[in-house]
């Protein structure tokens, strides 16, 4: 009588084997799903190769600049993923997580500001014509286009590395010329970037050495005013 249940250990072995198989399959699909979701979340670097041949910007300088930009995209994705993994591993309350969190804005803005910058440049000659809404706003607010141009240029000539951004404040519609230190210090919360100029040394030194003023002149000649006008909300 005591041997009635002798097959049980064998069945138990089959069940535990099946259970292990199902667990492995579940883990496999869970990992595939996670990879898929992560890929969907990732930022993709944009191509600005059409800018090659831009007057005042050598192809070598532009190519190096595109590579730097791609690095910001890579690091933005990387930080996003690492921080997600740290949260899952219950490491969100660590100093390491806090430092990555601080770093994220620097990388993200480095990515996005380069996109604004490359996208407001064009090989096609573009003029700040008076019939453009953004030019009318500049004139209305600064008196003359030239007066505002002096302010923007002087901001770009400031010592240090960063960006000059013409921002539009959405509540009042006012525009501001702003210095952003590195990629993350000095942004105006909620404002829309209309015109973005990179004044990190990598943006000009290869072509102009220390002559930042000459680079800024080349930048003025390369602005796509149609894009700047499109970003402006009249
Ligand atoms: Fe740059």
Image: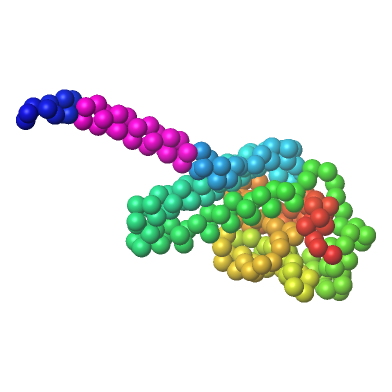
| Res. 132 image quadrant | bottom right
Q: Residue at x 87, y 53 (%)?
A: 127
Nearer to me, 64 or 2: 2
- Specify the segment rendered in magenta: 11-35
Q: Is residue 43 left or right of residue 7?
A: right
Q: Residue 125 location in percent, x, y?
A: 85, 46
Instruction: Indicate the quadrant containing the N terminus: top left, top right, bottom left or bottom right.
Output: top left
Quadrant for the C terminus, please. Answer: bottom right
Most distant residue in the right direction: 131
Residue 175 falls in image quadrant: bottom right
Residue 22 lies within the magenta run: yes
217 versus 173 height, above or below: above
Q: Residue at x 86, y 57 (%)?
A: 128
- As drawn, is 46 to the left or to the right of 232? left
Q: Main secondary structure of the magenta part?
A: helix
Magenta stretch: includes residue 12? yes
Q: Residue at x 62, y 53 (%)?
A: 112
Asked if 216 appears above or below 16 in the picture, the reply is below
Q: Is residue 49 above or below residue 189?
A: above
Nearer to us in this view, 4 or 193? 4
> Residue 187 appears at what percent x and percent y?
62, 67
């Amino acid at each position: 009588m005591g041997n009635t249940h002798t097959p049980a250990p064998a069945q138990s072995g089959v069940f535990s084997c099946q259970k292990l198989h199902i667990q492995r399959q579940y883990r496999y699909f869970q990992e595939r799903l996670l990879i898929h979701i992560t890929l969907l979340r990732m930022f993709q670097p944009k191509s600005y190769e059409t800018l090659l041949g831009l007057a005042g910007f050598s192809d070598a300088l532009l190519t190096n600049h595109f590579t730097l930009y791609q690095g910001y995209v890579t690091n933005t994705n990387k930080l996003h993923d690492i921080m997600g993994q740290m949260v899952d591993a219950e490491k969100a309350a660590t100093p390491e997580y806090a430092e990555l969190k601080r770093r994220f804005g620097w990388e993200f803005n480095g990515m996005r500001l380069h996109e604004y910058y490359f996208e407001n440049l064009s090989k096609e000659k573009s003029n700040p014509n008076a019939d453009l809404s953004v030019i009318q706003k500049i004139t209305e607010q600064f008196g003359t286009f030239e007066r505002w141009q002096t302010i923007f240029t002087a901001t770009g000539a400031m010592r240090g590395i960063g960006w000059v951004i013409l921002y539009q404040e959405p509540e009042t519609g006012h525009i501001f010329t702003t210095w952003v230190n590195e990629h993350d210090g000095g942004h105006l919360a909620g404002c829309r970037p209309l015109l973005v100029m990179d004044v990190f040394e990598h943006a000009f030194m290869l072509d102009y050495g220390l002559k930042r003023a000459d680079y800024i002149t080349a930048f003025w000649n390369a602005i796509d005013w149609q894009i700047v006008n499109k970003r402006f909300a009249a």
